[in-house]
Amino acid sequence: MSDILQKILHTKAQEVAQQKTEISLEAMKQLAQQAEPVRDFIAAIRAKHAAKQPAIIAEIKKASPSKGLIRADFNPAQHAQDYESAGVACLSVLTDEPYFQGSPDYLRQARAVASLPVLRKDFMIDEYQVYQARAWGADAILLIAAALDEATLLHLEQVAHSLGMAVLLELHDESELAKCTRLTTPLRGVNNRNLRTFDVDLQQTIALLPHLAGQIVVTESGIAGKADVDFMQSHGVHTFLIGETFMRADNIAAAVRTLF
């Protein structure tokens, strides 16, 4: 595990412990049950595939540890509307505050103005966060294989599915495959960014494809334009999680449309 990931997870454990003192697990479960109905994240992706279009999970991201501030004029609601008008399949919203300048408010704001399913993009380590994600309105969560052991991955997936939420399982390399064999989610993300060096290599996704037959493979990080989309589609990858490329664009909707 990379130093930055270890640091983030340590901070996250402290954050969750503090949150539990403010709203108990039982209270959070109640809030999750009272949330608006779940939007079908996987169906939204499959609908794009059926229409022979790339399925784009468009990210609302203000900053990152490796790049610092990405977008100064950050407006989650406006970005969500721009994304929806441009024809993306789903939204992804960063909710981690210390490292990505994210916020649960950004997720709520984005979901309130768009009809798209929304992924909570965060570092999930505890079932509390899964109930919390649903309480905030999230329709899907991210589980990072590098951050969790097999038992925790299985448990968090089970909790998410019990709430009707989808799970995007993020992988980086072959070493993480073994502990993920019992997970049932069809969504398998491959992060092209090396968490140790932060270098990006699209071959990361290609290398894992033989191990992900029959899954919905989501390529993450490093998709900079239509050439990258075409390259991935030529290898049978039709689902893309894209954030920074769009967040740096002067016209977000126009940037999305260039990929179709």
Image (cartoon, rainbow, N blue to C red):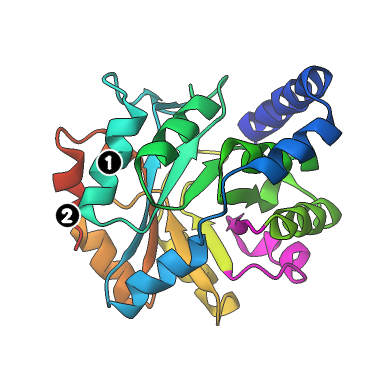
- Could you say whether the residue bearing mark 2 is in a helix, strand or loop? helix
Residue 38 placement (x, y as % from top left): 56, 54
Residue range corresponding to the magenta coloring? 164-186
Q: Mark 2 points at which residue?
A: 257
State the residue in front, 208 or 9. Answer: 9
Query: The N terminus appears in which quarter of the rendering?
Result: top right
Residue 174 quadrant = bottom right
Residue 176 placement (x, y as % from top left): 69, 60
- Residue 174 among those drawn in magenta: yes
State the residue in front, 70 or 114. Answer: 114
Q: Mark 1 points at which residue?
A: 81
- Could you say whether the residue bearing mark 1 is in a helix, strand or loop? helix
Can residue 126 be seen here? Answer: no
Measuring 20% from the left and 40% from the top, which residue is drawn there? 252
Above or below 81: residue 12: above
Measuring 28% from the left and 46% from the top, which residue is drawn there? 83
